[in-house]
Amino acid sequence: MLEVRDLVVRYRRGFLSAPGLAAVNSVSLTLPLGHTLGIVGESGSGKSSLLRAILRLVPVTSGAIRLNGQDFLSLKGPSLRVARHGIGVVAQNPFLSLSPRLTIAEILAEPMQAAGLAVNHRARAASLLAQCGLPAEFLTRRARELSGGQAQRVAIARALTLSPSLLVLDEPTSALDVSVQAQILNLLQDLKQDLGLSMLFVTHNLKVVAHISDSLLVMQRGEVVESGPTDQVMQAPTKAYTQELMGFGRHALRP
Ligand SMILES: Nc1ncnc2c1ncn2[C@@H]1O[C@H](COP(=O)(O)OP(=O)(O)O)[C@@H](O)[C@H]1O
Ligand SMILES: [Mg+2]
């Protein structure tokens, strides 16, 4: 459903980016329908840049992206908007991504209004919340009144409002307590099964993503250093870098 070929993202020369260095350097990946691809790498390895390029939030220097058979990079205006509805996005910190002033009902209705979705917004919001493990009484609350795990459930519900086929998650559990992380991972696993979602799951923590990924892509300095079925990568990591991400290295990387 998603195919990325030789993708390059080179930011304008500026502070932090060394001249000539690409944040994403010739990355290719294939995500079949209903699969989860875990994208792992140390901080600064280009994971978020790769996701942002796939969402067309940063300019792509070169390469190709095909989404559901469409040349995604050539889409403009209304056709780009419609194609984007097929992608749900979940960020790391729900308290930054959810407006603190709005009720949960308003937060969930917003994308439906913007897309002109002809359904009962409140009923759909309640059913999305239920699907994400929260009772309808949360509709009248505000994000700042929620725990981190509850807020991330709302963020996931919002990402699902337009029935996307692809869910893109950038460090979705990294801001949460360890016990809550597992609950969110279980929820994502259930949603994947119930809705047939495909997922791109970005994290610096290989252990977090290994359980729920069909395949893994390991990034270092903008490049893919290892990729393949999760079992294969976990059982026989070919690179010392991957072993370090698994916590086996002498200098195990800190989060
Ligand atoms: N908007 C930007 N402008 C310039 N350089 C950037 C920008 N965003 C990220 N970078 C650089 O691109 C590289 C990859 O960053 P990023 O994609 O955020 O990695 P990760 O998500 O794996 O931590 C880093 O060197 C970072 O400094
Ligand atoms: Mg990042």
Image: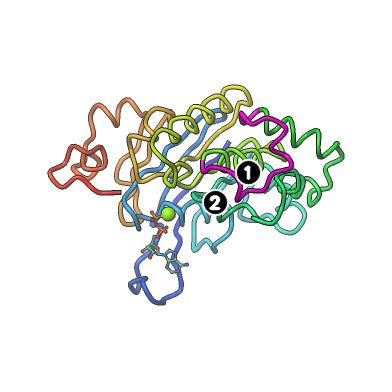
Left or right position of 40 against 194:
left
Tell me, yes or no, whether the highlighted magenta stretch contains residue 135: yes
* Nearer to me, 218 or 211: 211
Quick one: 207 or 59, which is closer to the camera?
Answer: 207
Range of magenta residues? 131-148
Q: What residue is shown at x 60% (from left), y 51% (from top)? A: 144
Name the element at disc 1.
Answer: strand
Circle 2/circle 1 CB separation < 8 Å:
yes
Q: Is residue 254 above or below residue 166?
A: below
As drawn, the residue found furthest toward the bottom would be: 14
Q: Please, what secondary structure does the residue beneath circle 2 have?
A: helix
Q: Which image quadrant shows ligand 1?
A: bottom left
Residue 114 position in % (x across, y down): 79, 52
Amino acid bearing label 1: Ile
Q: CA distance from mark 2 to mark 1?
A: 10 Å
Check residue 53 in the rendering and tell me which mark sits there, or answer none. none
The residue tagged 2 is: 54
Q: Which mark is residue 87?
A: 1
- Give the colour scheme of this rendering: rainbow
Q: Is residue 236 above or below residue 47?
A: above
Q: Nearer the viewer, residue 4 or 169?
A: 169
**The CB of the residue at mark 2 lies under 8 Å from ligand 1:** no
Query: Badge 2 local density, few (<14 within 10 Å), some, or many (20+)?
Result: many
User: What x and y, as percent, mark residue 151?
Assistant: 58, 43
